[in-house]
Image (tube, grey):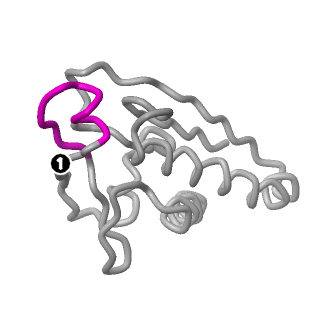
Amino acid sequence: MIKIEFLYYNKTKCKRCASTDKSIKLTLGELKKAIKITKSEVILKEKKLPKSKIHLSPTILINGKDIEKILNIKSKLKSNTCLSCCQLIGHTVTCRTFNYKGVKYNFIPRKMIINAIKTTFKT
């Protein structure tokens, strides 16, 4: 069984959260056949974060482990100013960024999610 948790601040008005939500949905759609073949179960849980935890948005946990930790044990939480959330909150806030294969993203890309799930299956 694979448990995917999507932690976000606002997936309707924040571009980072909306893009990550789209990545998750596309990934799960692509993996449906593999999931049926292996008879595995995937559970997706979504949780809206409070303002006090906005710096953790967006986050994906796979079986309780942060996606970056699955793919790169040495990674440290990175962030930058999130214009969408700044408008929502009314002052400057930072949200997570992600480095994947040498490219910096303001959301979690589909290929990163797929790689993390494959890595989780291997261990």
Residue shown at 37% from the left, 71% from the top: 100
Start and end of the magenta stretch? 84-95
Seen in the image, is 66 located left or right of residue 54? right
- Please name the residue shown 86% across and 52% down the image: 36
- Disc 1: which residue: 81
Instruction: Say which residue appears at 84% left-offset and 49% top-offset.
Output: 39
- Name the residue at 29% across, 28% down: 88
In the rendered view of the protein, which quadrant contains the N terminus? top right
Q: Is residue 65 left or right of residue 43?
A: left
Mark 1 closeness class: few <14, some 14–19, many ≥20 residues within 10 Å = some
Q: Position of residue 120 (x, y in %)?
A: 53, 57
- In terms of image quadrants, where is residue 103? bottom left
Q: Residue furthest left?
A: 92
> Which x, y percent locates residue 87?
26, 33
- Place of residue 99 in the rendered image (x, y in percent of width and height, measured from the top left): 30, 68
| Quadrant in the picture for residue 13 | top left
